[in-house]
Amino acid sequence: MTKEKLTYSMDELIDKVKVYIDSDSGISLITKAYEFAKDKHAGQYRASGEEYINHLLATAIILTTVYADTYTLCAGLLHDTLEDTDTTKQELEEEFNSEIAGLVYGVSKISRIHFSTENEALIEYYKKIIVGMSEDVRVIIIKLADRLHNMRTLWALPEEKRKKKAKETLEILTPIAHHLGIHKIKSELEDLCLRYLKPDVFYDIAEKLNKTKLERDNVVAEMLTSVSNILTEHHIKHEIKGRSKSIYSIYKKLEKGRKFSDIYDLLALRILVESEQECYTIIGLIHSKYKPIPKRFKDYIAMPKANGYQSLHTTVFGIDGYLFEIQIRTYDMDEVAENGVASHWAYKEHKDLTKASKSSTEAKLQFFKAIIDLNEDKMSSEDFVNSVKNEVLSDNIYVFSPKGDIFELPKGSTPIDFAYRVHTKIGESMIGAIVNNNIVPLDYELQDNDIVKINTSKNSCGPSKEWLNIAKTTQAKNKIKSFFTKNEKDLYIEKGKEALEKELRKKKIAFNDFLSDENLTIILNNIKEESVIDIYYDIGSNKYSPTYIIGLIDKYHEEPKEIKLKPKPKNTDNDIIVDGIDKIKVNLANCCHPIPGDNIIGYITKGNGITIHRDNCPNLYNLEERMINVSWNDNIKNKYLVTIMIYSKPYNNALLEIMQKATTSNISIDSMKTINKIDDVLYEIEVWVNNVEHLNNFMRDLSNFTYINSVERFMR
């Protein structure tokens, strides 16, 4: 296996930098960064045996191929100083500037995390990193250059680590390179990943390519001469070259069932010219000489890809009947095709780097917009990471609005996904869809280059819950769920207000008098809410009864009564002490399951002793009389039964992990009932606990599980 060269020199880097950076101060700053890094990493070596500074030089040299500016090259040389030396961010700011220090810090954060969702503890960090990358694209481009050199020297690591690193690169970093449009880095990373993940396949393809190389080179040379003569005859200044297909791209075609001999675009030409008009002229000239294959012509100039890629593609029957894929583009288009967003750093334009990269990102990379949109949806970190991996970094399609705006969506997307990607209001008012001038059902699977028109109506009742089963993207599903949550909340508020008004009428209390500022403050303080709307919602959702809310005011305004009671028994065996009574039968209410630590009150029953309720139990306020003060004993050794409700997303190991947490928390599970809903799962669990603090700690621990939405104590 050919090994990456181990020695690089600063002269080599400077020679490449001077091709596009002619600033003496810029060269000096890059040299200073090199000297600083060399000093900090002195005595450090990599697994390949090279001095560490060679890796940093290699990273910077890779960055010059995408015309990285001075600050980015400095950050490339310094990118491991925070991680592997005693350097601090403050020191970098003092030695260089805050922008370089910020870039190094950004790369450092990424380097600390292995891009894998297998470890749930890393998911929140991963989410922050992805969102951070979208804020400054230069950070991830430095990371890509760093990883490319690491992949070139991957042979130095043990096989297991090689495969792990290659898998991580292929799943996360190469899709990002694709969305950034950096073809030269993406293509090499893919080939290197395949070499370590499936070496047999890689070398089999390489061997077949070598066997046919001489024949292919001769045919390509003959075809190149023929096409070049045609363009010269028509006085078109051009550059034309044979283009090799990457081993990974051939592997992907073979994986789909194609035979090696049938991959006709192994023979390829790329033609570069000055103007867009010449591109279209050339396509006509080539088609007039060589017959094109139907449906293989693609115009990415008129309809660029979301990452900015532009080119004309055609496949023709060429010399001796060989099939040739031909790409035609301008020199500027080729710059974008090879370097993607990094092409906006091109030295020709001398634009401010930050503004240029930011504007190009906003304008052309919906990849970043999709990440920001997902982050703003406030989904769980696990859902966010899975959505980025499965929807943003996966194979995507490109569809158009009737005005020609291009939208990037994951494969399998429907008109519902398109509508919500355009705007939430479009989704909520959608009544139908037209694709390529044909009416389609809402579950129609969109295809590349579809033109999608969404029909809307002001009188629309909003989305249907059935849409949750049709939509592909997390963004659309979350918007639909949010619509129903808001509607249901509005219904609960209305229901709660009506119930309170009805109860006040029964008690002949004026509604406005009851909700005076003084009373409102008393109620809100008791139930720990913020507004009268929250009171209505709590009543409508059955959290509190209207009687309980009214009772809070009655209880507050009651005149204190002097009641002479016997002192509490000092040494009682009972867990509950009843004021003034030594021995009496005590029962715990089944409706509210009081446990030690709860504020409690007793109700004197007829012939069955005293029933103990929590003082906020809604059933108390229907009883009104025969109340008696009770309290918990200070020394309680028994455990008490309580019911909790766990609202969870579907997760195979949920029950097992909940039971394990109960065991480690010294909590016994008495019974467990599972209720499956459309989008989530409800577990009703009865547990034995020591007291309120014991229960609250357990509930808090459960709430920290990423798949659990909420945990509530149940009261009938």
Image (cartoon, rainbow, N blue to C red):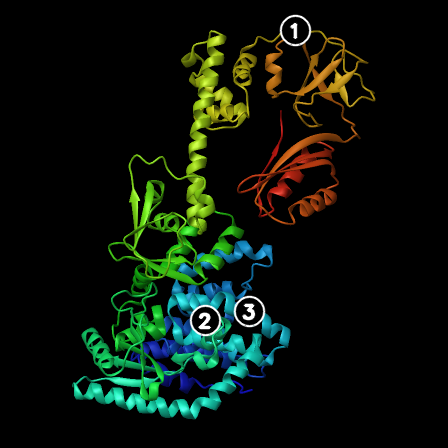
Helix, strand or loop at disc 3? helix
Mark 1 → mark 2, Cα distance in angstroms: 79 Å
Residue linked to disc 2: 144
Q: Residues within 10 Å of mark 2 (few under 14, many from 20)?
A: many
547 versus 716 height, above or below: above
Between discs 1 and 3, the one toward the N terminus: 3
Residue 284: percent from left, percent from top: 21, 77
Please say whether residue 85 is visible from this viewpoint. no
Q: Residue at x 45, y 74 (%)?
A: 145
- The answer to whether marks 2 and 3 mark residues whose Cβ atoms lie closer than 8 Å is no
Residue 118: percent from left, percent from top: 59, 59
Residue 584: percent from left, percent from top: 79, 13
Residue 588: percent from left, percent from top: 72, 21
Please say whether residue 629 is visible from this viewpoint. yes
Q: Residue at x 52, y 15 (%)?
A: 550
Q: Residue at x 29, y 80 (%)?
A: 22
Tally of marks: 3
Q: Residue 222 occupies which quadrant of the picture?
A: bottom left
Q: Would you say 94 lies left or right of 347 here?
A: right
Residue linked to disc 3: 167
Instruction: Name the residue type under label 3.
Output: Lys
Between residues 340 and 387, which one lies in front from this camera angle? 387
Q: Residues within 10 Å of mark 3 (few under 14, many from 20)?
A: some
Instruction: Name the residue type under label 1.
Output: Glu
Q: Residues within 10 Å of mark 1 (few under 14, many from 20)?
A: few
**Picture disc at residue 562:** 1
